Amino acid sequence: MGIDFHNKENKYAYTSRSADHSWEEAIKKLVPIDTITDAVDIGCGGGIYSKALADLGVPFVTGVDFSEAILEGAGENCKDYANISFKQGNAVETGLESKSFDLLLERALIHHLQDLDACFKEAYRLLKPAGYYIVQDRTPEDCLLKGDNSHIRGCFFELYPKLIEDIQAIQLPKG
């Protein structure tokens, strides 16, 4: 049984941590951040990565999530960031204007979706020409954490240790 994203009691479930420094370094290697003026964080949850993008220097960040409760927590989490706004929407119908964003981030989102094709079409609709689209579902580090009742992926890799070699082989581009 997963988290009820719409339950008000869960509004802070995704606000208590910060993006890892290694994530920020990877983004700087993949995207010329100094050329980005507008970014959208779809499936933003508590705003952790919206804040990270703003901290990297993105002038305007829009966070989109389908849960009003989670967005309420995100607003509180990012209250000191005048350049971050939040909007209720979902990955296939954001309600945002076409060709509005230089960077579109979908982190830890696609495993929740049934229609990836519709998600990707919406993402490309939102991107400006030559925009950057980053889909990050899980990191190797996430997968290899010890399994327990709240981290089922860890249990999976403990049951099938051969897959750990595949996870450890995943590398970000150099340079």
Image (cartoon, helix red, strand yellow):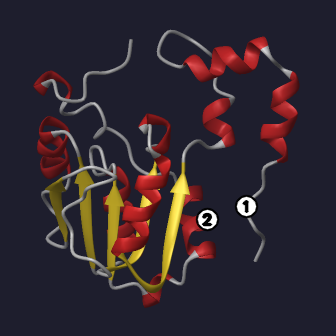
Q: Nearer the viewer, residue 117 or 16?
A: 117
Q: Where is residue 142 in the image (x, y as percent from the top left)?
A: 60, 35
Label 1 close to label 2 by CB (< 8 Å): yes
Q: Position of residue 39 (x, y in %)?
A: 34, 73
Q: Which residue is drawn at 25% across and 22% down?
A: 4
Could you tell me if residue 72 is visible in this image? yes
Q: Which of 24 and 127 is in front in this view?
A: 127
Q: What element carries label 2?
A: helix
The image quarter containing residue 30 is bottom right
**Distance CA(mark 1)–CA(mark 2):** 7 Å
Q: Where is residue 72 in the image (x, y as percent from the top left)?
A: 11, 43
Q: Is mark 1 on a helix, strand or loop?
A: loop
What crowding class fits label 2: few (fewer than 14 Cα within 10 Å), some (14-19), or many (20 or more)? some
Three-letter amino acid code at disc 1?
A: Leu
Q: In the picture shown, does residue 98 fall above or below 17?
A: below
**Left or right of residue 51: residue 173:** right
**Disc number for residue 154:** none
| Residue on which the image places disc 1 | 172
Three-letter amino acid code at disc 2?
A: Ala
Name the quarter where the C terminus is drawn.
bottom right
Name the quarter where the N terminus is drawn.
top left
Q: In the picture shown, does residue 136 fall above or below 27?
A: above
The image quarter containing residue 141 is top right
Q: Which residue is drawn at 14% across and 71% down?
A: 82
| Residue on which the image places disc 2 | 26
**Left or right of residue 113: residue 51:** left
